[in-house]
Every structure is written in structure tokens, then in C-alpha cells.
Image: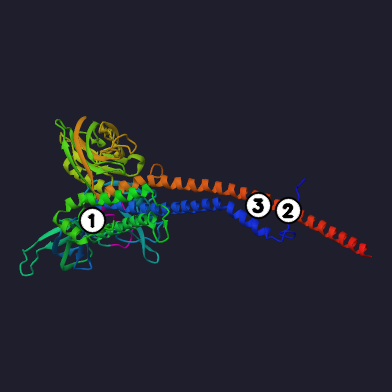
Amino acid sequence: MASAPTVSFSGIASGMDTAGIIKQLVAVQGNQQTLLKDQQATRNSAVSAYSSMLSGISTTVGQLKSLSNTSAWSTTAATSSSAAVTATATGGVSSSLSFDVKAVARAHTMISDGSVASTGAKVASTGEITLKTGGSTTGTKINVGTGSLGEVVSAINGANAGVTASAVQTSPGNYRLQVVSSSTGEASKFELDGLSGFAGGTGATTAGKMKDLVVGANATIVVGADPDDPDAGYEISSATNTFNDVAQGISFSVSKVESGVTVSSAVDTTKVTDQISGVVTNLNNLLSSIQTNTAWDPATKKGGPLLGDSTVRNLQQQVLSTVSSMNAPGLSVTQGGQVQFDKAAFDTAFKADPAATMAAWGADSSFTAASSSVGSARFVSAGTATQAGSYDVAVSTPAKPEQWQVIPPGTGVVGRTVALMRAGGSSKLDFTLESDDMAAEAARLNTALAQKNMGMTASVDSGGTGIVVSALNPGAAGAFTATNNSGTASTQIQAGTDVAGTIEGIAATGRGNLLTLPVDADSPAKGLSVAVTASGAGNVGTLDYKPGVAQSLSQLLSQVSDSESGSLVQAQTTAKNQAKDLQTQIDAWTDRLEAYRATITAKFTAMETSLQSLKAQQTSLSSFFSAAEANSKA
């Protein structure tokens, strides 16, 4: 059975405010719970403070990683005097070039000499056409099915031969075949044979076939031209409208013929200094947050939620000591414990010595070859836990590029076709030899490889009578296959091999020519990545690594904010657990206080009941004695 609720009477008999007394007694007992609630509020405030700091640190680490990659710094700005010429800065040097644009690059374009009534009309009677590119005399044969205009367009586009075809309706019921090279320049010229059936055309070499619509041409600029001296100046040409290596530190693209153009680049560190300013702002926000949350207010005699927290105080000191000890140009620490950036000082240092400034911010490294070195090594990147030091590099297997003898030594190779395919079938090229001149054929093949972005290069073999194709980059990722459909198999000379070796005696992961020590390696070099060039197995040498200020700060903040081992994350977890434990104690006190309230309420109720009973007895006795006294007088 459920117990009946306790009924209380507040001072009915006693005249006392028993309800108020009970409330005060419970409040006194509840002081301990109030203290626990205050402690929990402080712990929850600490959790919020840690969360805010960690969020800011995450943003700052991203900025620092970007800043420490000094090879990507944009430290120059380019300008052009012409809206038709676009200039782009490509290095940290100033330069200028004046020129006239004599011609822009054009993609070779051909169009059928005549037209047909529909895309279903037959235009290739033999079912095969021949595309000749790069001065080829034999070309690539393309099967076009029944030879309709539509099939010819699809077959050309499906051949991936560096041209694009389309059926152009020049007027109702009149369709012509147009073929455009995918590249520009003189080398984009091509011929298309095997077509027939186009009526009404004139002007082609053979009626009913193709004629040039646009002749492929290089872009040409003239430097030092003088209208009064026709022999003055010199020409520079490019297969595209972009000129990359004409002037140091600048590239530019032309779009129309124009005279008196000047392009220039000048050192401009605005983008980098804006990056640095952003980092400094976030660092100061972190330092201010630490200062505020650990401060003691003598007026209120209260401290911040992280008062006495050694974790954040240590972080504050580490940030300030890292900045002050690195002596990075433009960066300093104020007396008030903030980070200060002087843009003018940075600019001055950068203009005086760009390499030293970049090293001070990113990383400084040098390589010393071993006494019997088999190669060399250079710094590429470091992990968040990589420490400064000198680290020995050794190779057990050097990186090698994939290499095939695609054309065997000898003569009689004209007409032979080689199929090259990247691993996974991502890119494919069919190449047909047109002569026994291996140097000329290797040059033609290199042009085709570049146009298709195959990541390979061709060269004449040591005997001068065959062609070898090699991957541009060493490693397994550059693997490809070569098959010969003319009866002679291509031969793999060597497979693409990733480098294998050690850093500081610990096995490193090899990819291409990069050796990277795992981030969990038991070494201060963990996370270090170096590019190795080696002729064989053996000791390479010693790499000296010293992180700059951006790299050092990135490492520091990454370590304290690591999701598993970071000191700031662990401190936040501790605060969360403490707040949870305090809630358990608060809940227990709630139950205890309710039980106490019930106990003293029952006691006061019993007292009131007893007093009420005594009062009733007193009234009864008074009535009895009053009646007796009255009777005696009667």
C-alpha cells in the first residue's frame, strides 16, 4: 500500500511559523549543495573556455601550415600595360619586358570542300579515313563504319587523336565537316584523307575533300622593334598564346595583335604579410583568452574559470618563448605578453634576403653527403612532431622510373604502331612510325606524349637505332604498359620502383623518390619527408633540419590540440568529467535534502498535533472547573 502523504499544520497550535523554520533548516543543510553547484558552474565555464581556445587553435594551425609552405608564397605582383595581355608573377624577383604582339596562336582548322544534305549522307566510301598530324606522311587510320557524316564525326572524336570534329549546318539541308586541332601552334597542322561525297566544293587539293579554314600558327612577339629600322629587334614564338620563360619571374598570355606592350613584375609581399597578420591576430586572441580566464579580480575577489590552470599557462609561455626565440623578421613579443608584427621590417628583410626570410618562417635545411654517398637528399616537409636535428638518410632500393624499349633496334620499322597505356587505363596513346630516323620519330613521339599528358618521355636508345620510353617521375605510380601491334613485342627495361630506405636508422615509407618517416615512429624525426636521388643502395648523407617560426608554432599548437594526446584536450576532458561527477553529488544532495525536509516536517507536525491535543484538554478542564465553581456557589 502507498503511504499516506504527510499532513502538516504550520503553527496552528504553537503559533510559530513552522513552515518558515523548516525552509530555513533545509536551506542550512543545502549550503553544501550550493557549493557543489558553484564548483560545477566553474567547471562548465572551464569546458567552454577550452572549447573556444581549441576552436581558435584549429583555425590558427591551418593558417600556420599554409604560411610554413614558403614555396607557395606569393611575393610578387605582375602588371600589364594592355588589357589584351594578361601577366602573372612566377617568382620572387622583379622584371620587365616591352614588346609588340605580332601574331596570336591559332589552332589548325579544316572544313569540307562541299556539303551534303544530311548527317546520314555517305562521305567516306571506303569506310576508313587517315589523319596525318605533325608532318606525318602515313598517319593514323580511323575506321568510320559505313562512312556517313555522323559516323565520321563520332569516329574522329572517339580516336582521341588530338582533333575534334563536328557536322556544321551552314544552311538548311547543307552540312559540312569541320575538324579543329585540340592544340594551337604550327605543330597543330594536320591532314585528313579518305573523304568523298561532299558536292559543290572548290578550292581543296582534290574536289570533294578537305581544305584549310584556319592555318595553325604560333603566337609571336617582337622585342626591341624599331619602326625606323626593319632589322631591329628579335622574334620569340610560342605554340600557345602563353609565354612562360621569356622574362624571369613573369609569364604572360596574349590575345590580339598590338604594339607597345609592357609587362612587369615587382616584389610585393602584401599577400604574405596579410597571412602573417591573420596568424598574429589569432595568436593574440588565444593569449588574451588565457589571460582573461586565469585572472584574479581583487575587487570581486573572484578568479576566472581557469585560475591556477598550469596547462594553459604553460601554453601561453611556450607561444611567447617560441616567437621571441626564433627571431623571425618582423615578429616580436610586447611587454604586455602579446605578439607584434612589423610589416615594414619584414619587407626590408625579404627584399634583402628572400631565402633567409623564408627559412626563418618555414624551415631551414641543408644536406651533407656521406663519405661514400650514393646520392643526395633534400627537405620536403615535416610533421607536427618533427624536431630540429641532424638525421642520417640511407637507401636500400633507389627509386626508378618505368622504362620500356618500345621500338627495337634495327630498320624496317615504318608503319609499326605502338600502344602506350598508363596503369589503370587513365591515358592511352597509339603511335605509328613514319620513318627510320629514330631521332625524328622520338621527337614526334614526345610531342604526342605531351599533347596527351601521358607523363612520359621518349629518347633514342644507346645504339641510336631504337626508341626508349620512360616515365617522367620515378616510382610505381608512373607505371605504364607498351604493346606493339606489328608483330614485335615491346620490352620492359625496368619497372617503376618506389624508393626504399631509412631515416635515422628507422624504416621509412617510400613513394616515388620521397622517403617519409611514419608519424608514430620512435624518433624525433617522425613525420619528416625527404626527396632522395640515389644511384644505388648505401648511405646518402645527413639532412640538417630546423623549423622556422610558422612550422614551430604549428607543431606546438597541433600537439596541445591533438584529439587523443593533446594537453588542452585532456584538460577539457578532465573538466567535463569533474562537472559530471559534481552533478552526481548534487543529485544525491537533492535526495538527501528531500528526506531531511520530510523528517523535520513530520516532527513539527507531531509537535503541533500534541500541542493541539493539550489545548483541547486544557479547554475541557477549564470548562469542568468553571462548571464546578458555579455549582458550589449555587
- The amino acid at mark 3 is Arg
Q: Are marks 1 and 3 in contact (CB under 8 Å)?
A: no
Task: Tell me the quarter of the image containing the C terminus.
Answer: bottom right
Residue at 75% over, 59% down: 13
Residue lying at the far right of the rendered structure: 634
Q: Residue 519's quadrant in the figure?
A: top left
Look at mark 3 in the image and give the residue it sits on. Answer: 597
Residue span colored magenta: 179-201
Q: Residue 150's quadrant in the figure?
A: bottom left
- The amino acid at mark 2 is Met
Left or right of 580 in this view: 118: left
The disc, 1 or 3, on the residue closer to the chain's N-terminal end is: 1
Q: Are marks 1 and 2 in contact (CB under 8 Å)?
A: no
Question: Between marks 1 and 2, how big is the CA–CA gap?
Answer: 76 Å
Residue lying at the far front of the rendered structure: 633
**SS type, badge 3:** helix
Residue at 76% over, 47% down: 2
The magenta stretch spans residue 187: yes
Q: Alpha-carbon neighbours of circle 2 within 10 Å: few (<14), some, or many (≥20)? A: some
Circle 1 or circle 2, nearest the eye: 2
Circle 1 or circle 3, nearest the eye: 3
Question: Between marks 3 and 2, how big is the CA–CA gap?
Answer: 15 Å
Q: Alpha-carbon neighbours of circle 1 within 10 Å: few (<14), some, or many (≥20)? A: some
**SS type, badge 2:** helix
Query: Between 588 and 78, which is closer to the camera in this rendering?
Result: 588
Question: Between marks 1 and 3, how big is the CA–CA gap?
Answer: 63 Å
Look at mark 1 in the image and give the residue it sits on. Answer: 332
Look at mark 2 in the image and give the residue it sits on. Answer: 607
Res. 134 visible in picture: no
